[in-house]
Amino acid sequence: MMYLSQSYTYISLYGDKFSPIEFTELVDLKPTDSGIKNEKRKSGATLKECFWKYQLDKTDALEELENALESLIGVFKDKVPVMKDFIQKNNLKVKCYVVIEAKNDEDSGVFLNADFISFLNELKASIEIDVYNI
């Protein structure tokens, strides 16, 4: 079935002071975005903290979101021990975002399986789920 609603997910590390370049080298993974505290963005906004972000491509919000969350685990699974050390050393926070762009009153929801919850717990990460009706 073809759904119009889309979703995407990403993980972000953020804190007062750390090197996104150092983290990139450590995990050997190119971020989709990163920034340094006090850096001015194209939008004109000034960053209030450093961050490193890795986002997956948009998928179908209803049937593919669970697979996207599993893919996110797959990307980071072997990197968790070094990530935990870096996070602790630099006093960082971790957040996983799930964004749903709902269309045509399609039902949308998020299923978090035990593996994903364990992954978040291992990184001491929080999760934010945003639904935008567009």
Image (tube, helix red, strand yellow):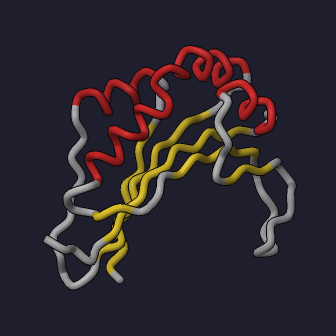
Indicate left or right for 134 with 48 as reference: left
Farthest-out residue, front: 1
Indicate left or right for 44 with 115 as reference: right
- Residue 28, image x, y percentages: 67, 30
- Residue 83, image x, y percentages: 60, 23
Above or below, 64 against 43 in this view is above
- Residue 12, image x, y percentages: 58, 44
Quadrant showing the N terminus? bottom left
Decide which of 102, 64 is in the foreground and name it: 64
Please state the total of marks drawn on the protein image.
0
Residue at the spot x=21%, y=62% of the render?
A: 62
Indicate left or right for 127 with 43 as reference: left
Residue 17, visible in the rendered structure: no
Residue at the spot x=71%, y=24% of the render?
A: 26
- Residue 24, image x, y percentages: 72, 34
Can you tell which quarter of the image residue 17 is in?
top right
Above or below, 100 against 47 in this view is below
Indicate left or right for 56 with 98 as reference: right
Can you tell which quarter of the image residue 19 is in?
top right
Residue at the spot x=58%, y=46% of the render?
A: 54
Above or below, 131 against 49 in this view is below
Residue at the spot x=18%, y=81% of the render?
A: 105
Residue 22, visible in the rendered structure: yes
Quadrant showing the C terminus? bottom left
Decide which of 25, 110 is in the foreground and name it: 25
